[in-house]
Amino acid sequence: MTSALRDHAETDGDIKVTLSSAPGADVTTLDLATVTVGTVDVARAKVMASLDTAAGGRIVLRFARQALLDAGLLTRSTSELVVTGDLASGVQILAHVPVNVH
């Protein structure tokens, strides 16, 4: 599984995380109710997701930047965000997403 992060600071205030499937981990079956970044769960993060099955099984998660800031997870010294969640198969994913805060 691979991941990428994009900060949409100038547009909507969201942090966009793209997760890509890998053998044994089909992220398109991610149970959104189990997704967290650190202590921020889906309800607090206002996660939005979209599936891109044509591109090999990717899911795009958008987290409200303010929720991550309020939880102390996004600071000038933050170097990564850790995204966790459960797939429908019961497999738990753990994605270490590099962050460069400006």
Image: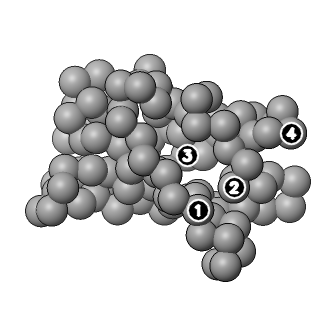
Give the label, 2 or 3, closer to the camera: 2
Which sits earlier in the primary sequence, circle 3 or circle 1? 1
- Which dot marks residue 29? none
Dividing the picture into quadrants, the one containing residue 35 is top right
- Which dot marks residue 51? 1
Using the numbered discs, state the Cα–Cα distance from disc 3 to disc 1 in whole angstroms. 20 Å
Which residue appears at 71% of the width and 34% of the height?
86
Give the label, 3 or 1, closer to the camera: 1
Look at the numbered disc 1 and give the secondary structure of its residue: strand
Give residue 24's position: percent from left, percent from top: 87, 54
Quadrant that contains the C terminus = bottom left
Q: Residues within 10 Å of mark 2 (few under 14, many from 20)?
A: many
Q: Amino acid at mark 4?
A: Ser
Using the numbered discs, state the Cα–Cα distance from disc 2 to disc 4 in whole angstroms. 11 Å
Give residue 34's position: percent from left, percent from top: 61, 28
Which sits earlier in the primary sequence, circle 2 or circle 1? 2
Q: Amino acid at mark 2?
A: Thr
The residue indicated by pointer 4 is: 89
